[in-house]
Image (cartoon, rainbow, N blue to C red):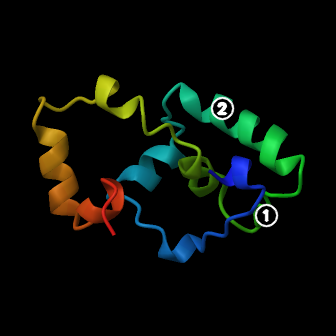
Amino acid sequence: MIEASRAGIRFRAKDLPVLPGALALAEKGHWSGGVKRNRRYIESTLGARGQLAIDRSLPEPLVNLLFESETSGASSSPFRRRAPKKCVRASGHEGDMLGGR
């Protein structure tokens, strides 16, 4: 949507809900295969047009979490089929993550 609208978007890192343990895993370099591809694509499109600016003071693992592929999560999840929905509900961010609000 951002690309098509030619707009920009601003996230405040302190306001982003990060699932427990996600940053610790990111700091150890645990990523899905899509992170590098997603980041390369976004930086070469939105970044090239000035629609993307990343604060250089942010830790690289946190920045990479923003590029983590949401679509490959279910296929690589170590949880049983119904567990991801339970995890989302337990996080308190169900509406945010599933399209509500």
Mark 1 against mark 2, which lies toward the viewer? 2
Question: Where does label 2 land, which residue?
Answer: 36
Where residue 96 appears, x then y in whole percent? 34, 63
- Asked if the residue at tag 2 contacts the one at tag 1, i.e. Cβ–Cβ closer than 8 Å, the answer is no
Q: Nearer the viewer, residue 98 or 77?
A: 98
Point 67% across, 65% down: residue:
9
Q: Identify which residue is drawn at 49% across, 76% down.
A: 15
Residue at numbered disc 1? 56
Residue 51 percent coordinates (x, y): 81, 58
Residue occupying the point 78% across, 55% down: 6
Query: In the picture provided, is 98 more to the left or to the right than 13?
Result: left
Q: Nearer the viewer, residue 23 or 16?
A: 16
Residue 23, percent across and down?
A: 46, 54
9 or 30: nearer the viewer: 9
Q: Is residue 101 above or below residue 64?
A: below
Q: Earlier in the sequence, mark 1 or mark 2?
A: 2
- Identified at 48% across, 35% down, the residue is 30
- Which image quadrant is residue 10 in? bottom right
Vertical comparison of 47 with 73: above or below: below
Please state which amino acid type lies under the numbered disc 1: Arg
* Mark 2 burial class by Cα count in 10 Å: few <14, some 14-19, many 20+: some
- Label 1: state its secondary structure: loop
**Which of the 4 image quarters holds residue 42?**
top right
